[in-house]
Amino acid sequence: MADGTGVGVTAVDVTAESPYQVLVGHGVLDQLSQLCGDRARRVAVIHPPTLINVAARVEAKLSSAGLEPVRIDVPDAEAAKTAAVAATCWSVFGTAGFTRSDVVIGLGGGATTDLTGFVAATWLRGVRLITVPTTVLGMVDAAVGGKTGINTPEGKNLVGCFYEPAGVLCDLDVLASLPAAELVSGLGEVVKCGFIADPEILSLVEGDPTGVRSAGSAVLREAIERSIRVKATVVSGDLRESTSSGTRVGRELLNYGHTLGHAIERREKYRWRHGEAISVGMVFAAELSRLAGRLDPQLVDRHVRALELVGLPVSYRAGVLDELLATMALDKKTRGSTLRFVVLDALAKASILEGPPPELIAAAYERVSSQ
Ligand code: GLY
């Protein structure tokens, strides 16, 4: 397994409404002060308690660049995405006197960067935002693409807005302390990018499944960079998820495996990690595609193989489809009146399957059911 260190910084351009770059590499955190811009004075660093050491390092770097860092410690994971936590952040900004030229940094996983994006977008109608994702999932998905938001008791991400960062720093060094199960969960989104857009990612995963699970490996770095490019291309073409219509796929492409995946996450009360749930969701979507006569069975098998190779689940409980369908029906309210699935017609060629017959859904679910 090659060592992925010391090979410089990779820049991926996102060119939607306010162009910015995603920088990937070892030690890219060093670029943080520069990215804050010339006008900044105060810089909020929003982070969960688990990242206190990295946050303290960031604080020291900002101070030595003459900036005034203000650390804001928020709860871990989804517990950060509440109106109460957002209000705490606004209150800190107000007390510290944050102006329009100051900066907000989100340092953490997807939940932290979603919350941070939302409070940055809403403080004084929008201040400079920098995201520093510290998980594979955050790097390849949440931190890139401008979706921000918090949850309400009625559901996830019901309050939020599109707000693009000024830059995203993916420092591969921070992955060294990521728990193995978290890293593997992020690979669910990586494998997704392989199936929907960049099959070379699948070759990387299949060629070196151990390497791709190892923080610091060259193969993981390449898989992350390729996945970021997939996301950057998709969101650059459809930032606001508005070009999917009928069977045309825009940003909705990124939801491959997510219709069933979200329902599983909800049924499991979010004890399943996102990547685990969408892993089953992708096999289900592939089965739907096959049963609808669109996808070669060998590609369905390839889903199972690739996901199992990285250690992700490919089946879920039998006998709970009705429950899952009820949740999917709630989900569909945000997308229109019929149940929509992103499906594959071939490798890297997606389309939309709208309102499939219940027998087709049941048959596909049967194929992913465990006992
Ligand atoms: N996570 C899906 C999206 O950013 O659209």
Image: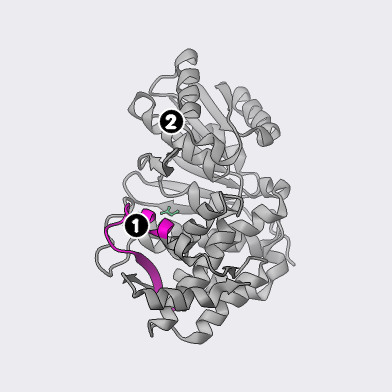
**Ligand 1 lies in which image quarter?**
bottom left
**Which colour assignment does the render follow?**
one colour
Identify residue type, mark 1. Lys
**In the figure, is residue 338 to the left or right of 196?**
left
Mark 2 or mark 1, earlier in chain: 2
Q: Position of residue 85 (x, y in %)?
A: 50, 28
**Range covered by the magenta-colored residues:** 326-346
Q: In the rendered image, is residue 364 in sight?
A: yes
- Binning the other alpha carbons within 10 Å of mark 1 as few (below 14), some (14 to 19) or many (20 upward) gives some
Disc 1 under 8 Å from ligand 1? The reply is: no
Query: Which residue appears at 49% of the width and 46% of the height?
Result: 143
Q: Is 342 one of the magenta-colored residues?
A: yes
Tag 2–tag 1 contact (CB < 8 Å)? no
Q: Is residue 75 above or below residue 202?
A: above
Distance from Cα at disc 2 to Cα at disc 1: 27 Å
Q: Position of residue 231 (x, y in %)?
A: 44, 58
Q: Position of residue 365 (x, y in %)?
A: 49, 73
**Quarter of the image that includes the C terminus:** bottom right
- Binning the other alpha carbons within 10 Å of mark 2 as few (below 14), some (14 to 19) or many (20 upward) gives many
Please name the residue that numbered disc 2 is placed on.
119
Q: Is residue 261 above or below residue 334?
A: below
Query: Which residue appears at 63% of the width and 27% of the height?
Result: 59
Query: Which residue appears at 49% of the width and 72% of the height?
Result: 284
**Quarter of the image that includes the N terminus:** bottom right
Please name the residue that numbered disc 1 is placed on.
332
Q: Camera-side residue: 293 or 213? A: 293
Mark 2 vs mark 1, foreground winner is 1
Q: Is residue 162 above or below residue 289?
A: above
